[in-house]
Amino acid sequence: MKTFDISYSFKAPRDYIQGPDMLSQCAGVAARQFSERLSNIVFTMHRMSNKNMRLELKKLSDRDPKIESNDVALLRFTVGDEAWVGRLKEREDGPTESYEYDEDAVLGLTRLDADQLSIRLLEESPYTPIETLTSMTKALHLRVYPNATGKWIFCKWESQSWPLPSKLTGTTIRVVQALGSRLTKSEIILDGSAIGQIYFSARKAA
């Protein structure tokens, strides 16, 4: 097993680490360990956290690892024909820095179609691909499900490869499945092909 310490910054005014930041950092660390792209990505959030993390990276014989009680999130992927799992666990210390993140700046670059349950990116975003896609999906949910109770939260990601394309103009996100009233699955389409699926859950306020 290999371990890597990962430090984060808060996105003001948030006082927790966003799931997409966890995904981006731990997938980035994992990708740097290999000369090939990661494939068959499944990232699953288990709980929220305001701590920095330790990534425990391990090769698997079992391709369906289970979340352990002290996991914050679980990253599954393959490299060649080998299956790997990365477990994100809390460290004692938390982020000491924060920066501004304007989700509305992303929304202004999109066209939203509530009837089609979709949103399309018209121009390049100033943020990372996963930040952009998450902000688009959140905006879509706030429009399509105005009466949902709680706060829409990123909870799972699936894609055939990582890293994501750096240019996303023309990307469309469409809700393809609502699992009850509190969990959705949306498909991300770029140039006619699916590049990933993003899941959101409606978390009740504490």
Image: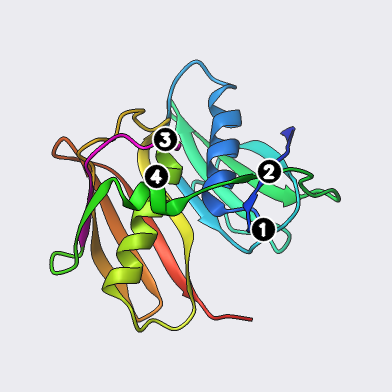
Look at the numbered discs 2 and 1 and tell me whether their residues touch, using CB distance below 8 Å: no
| Quadrant including the C terminus | bottom right
Between tags 2 and 3, which lies in front? 3
- Say if the magenta span includes residue 125: yes
At label 4, which amino acid type do we have? Thr
- Identify whether 92 is placed above or below 191: below
Q: Main secondary structure of the magenta part?
A: loop
First of labels 2, 4 by sequence position: 2
At label 1, which amino acid type do we have? Tyr
Q: Which quarter of the picture shows residue 34?
A: top right
Between tags 4 and 3, which lies in front? 3
Residue density around tag 2, few if under 14, some if 14–19, many if 20 or more, within 10 Å: some
Look at the numbered discs 2 and 3 and tell me whether their residues touch, using CB distance below 8 Å: no
- Label 3: state its secondary structure: loop
**Residue located beneath label 4 in the image:** 132
- Label 1: state its secondary structure: loop
First of labels 4, 3 by sequence position: 3
**Residue located beneath label 1 in the image:** 16
First of labels 3, 1 by sequence position: 1
Camera-side residue of 168 and 198: 168
Q: CA distance from mark 4 to mark 1?
A: 18 Å
Query: What range is drawn magenta here?
Result: 118-127
Q: CA distance from mark 2 to mark 3?
A: 18 Å
Q: Position of residue 157 (x, y in %)?
A: 43, 51
Q: Position of residue 161 (x, y in %)?
A: 37, 33
First of labels 4, 1 by sequence position: 1
**Residue located beneath label 2 in the image:** 9
**Residue located beneath label 3 in the image:** 126
At label 3, which amino acid type do we have? Pro
Q: Is residue 194 left or right of residue 19?
A: left
